[in-house]
Image: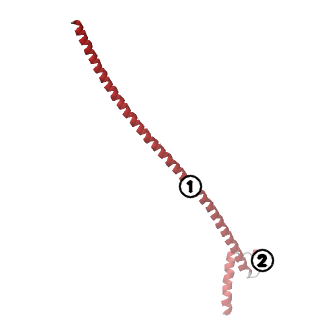
Amino acid sequence: MLAQFVTRPLLKMQQSSLAVVNNPVMQAVYTGATDETGAPQLAQRILQARLRTVIGRISDSADNLNEVSIQTAATVEQAAKGVLTQQSETDQVATAMHQMTATVQEVARNAEQAASASSHAKDEVDNGHKVMKEIIDSTNRAYRL
């Protein structure tokens, strides 16, 4: 009974070790043991190697992720600068359009004033023609008399 109490966990460990790796040649090469104590030693070495591999891959992935995040940050910064530049240029265009609108309105007012002045001048010329015609008519009547 005591023997089973001691050997049962050892047998389970042996079976677990063989589930990881079951290669007697590797066991002899890497552990120097050809008995049942070599299987757990080899399994431990294999699991440690796998763990180092996983850690290495995680480290590589973290490095790649860091590089991608740096590139993404740079891209976002460039995009933000582009947006600010575009906003500034849009503001400049809006200001220029406002100034052009004000200028067009001023030109329209001046054209309206010029048209009004031209109309007034025409009226004055027409009145002047009437007065001249009246003077000429009066002069002609006076001359006939």
Side of 29 relative to 12 (left or right): right
Q: Residue furthest bottom?
A: 1
Between 31 and 122, the residue placed more toward the observer is 122
Q: Quadrant of the C terminus?
A: top left
Residue 106, position in %: x, y?
Answer: 39, 36
Q: Tag count in the figure?
A: 2
Which residue in the structure is indicated by mark 2? 28
Q: Quadrant of residue 54?
A: bottom right
The residue at 73%/82% (across/down) is: 37
Q: Quadrant of residue 1?
A: bottom right
Q: Residue furthest top?
A: 144
Between 77 and 8, the residue placed more toward the observer is 77
Which residue in the structure is indicated by mark 1? 77
Residue 116, position in %: x, y?
Answer: 33, 29
- Residue 77 vertical placement versus 11 (above, below): above
For discs 1 and 2, the disc positioned in front in the rendered view = 1
The residue at 68%/69% (across/down) is: 53
Q: Quadrant of residue 42?
A: bottom right
Side of 70 relative to 45 (left or right): left
Local crowd size for mark 1, using a 10 Å CA cut-off: few (<14), some (14–19), many (≥20): few
Residue 76, position in %: x, y?
Answer: 55, 55
The residue at 66%/83% (across/down) is: 12
User: Which amino acid is tagged 1?
Assistant: Glu
Q: Earlier in the sequence, mark 1 or mark 2?
A: 2
